[in-house]
Amino acid sequence: MGQRFQMIENKEGSIKVYHSQWLWGDYAIRRIGTAVRNFIEYNKEGHRAFEEYLKGSFYGKPNDMNSVRRYFGDEDYNDNKILAEGRKQRKFKDAISELDNNDGYFYIEVDRDNKIKGYCFLRRDSNFKPLTSEEYLKEEYRQKGFSKEQEEEFKLGRETFKELNLIEIPEKIYNKE
């Protein structure tokens, strides 16, 4: 059990889903904010995938409980097939609502040149209305007892999200077989 959270990357219609245990509120802003900030700052040539930055923002933090992994075992960057479940198209909200989640979702769109188009946080209880990081945090309680380093990472995460566009989630998932 525990806190369950998914991060969904959409690169030109190809979807990848990641899962994190014990991720919510401050932790989500810190971890995902670090991944996004590093992706923007260090991936100017577009050689590395967002996934690499996402993993890097979670690993090597022994004092934090959260971790990240691919939700599905598909290594071909085609979670669309699994989410569409044999149908040519399916409502995006319906597909992600079936994921094992109780603390929200993070959705990010990246173009073919690895530039971020925008992001949003999502919650089932708000009918998947796109939320800014600040709106997402309003629904979460702030943790206490963070170290100075963790508090700084949280502030940088908040600043990073303020610089990005809020976007809508797609209406449908297309099975890209």
Image: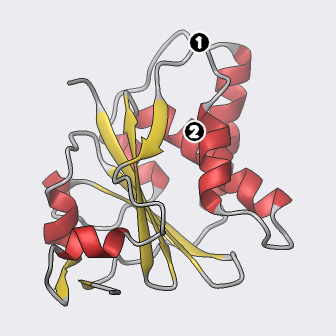
Q: CA distance from mark 1 to mark 2?
A: 13 Å
Quarter occupied by residue 173 = bottom left
**Which image quarter holds the C terminus?**
bottom left
**Which image quarter holds the N terminus?**
top left
**At 15% across and 64% down in the image, what residue appears?**
127
Quarter occupied by residue 16 = bottom left
Q: Using the image as rendered, state which of residue 57 and residue 121 is in the foreground.
A: 57
- Provide the residue designation for mark 1: 63
Please state the horizontal and vertical placement of residue 151, each as a whole percent of the image: 65, 25
Please state the horizontal and vertical placement of residue 64, each as a whole percent of the image: 54, 18
Please state the horizontal and vertical placement of residue 34, each as a whole percent of the image: 67, 44
Would you say residue 157 is visible in this rendering?
no
Q: Pointer 1: residues within 10 angstroms few (<14), some, or many (20+)?
A: few
Please state the horizontal and vertical placement of residue 14, each as a whole percent of the image: 45, 78
Q: Secondary structure at mark 2?
A: helix
What label sits on residue 31 in the rendered view? Answer: 2
- Looking at the image, residue 91 sits to the left or right of residue 53; the answer is left
Q: Secondary structure at mark 1?
A: loop
Which amino acid does the dot numbered 1 rest on?
Asn
In this rendering, the answer to whether 141 lies above or below 164 is above
Which amino acid does the dot numbered 2 rest on?
Arg
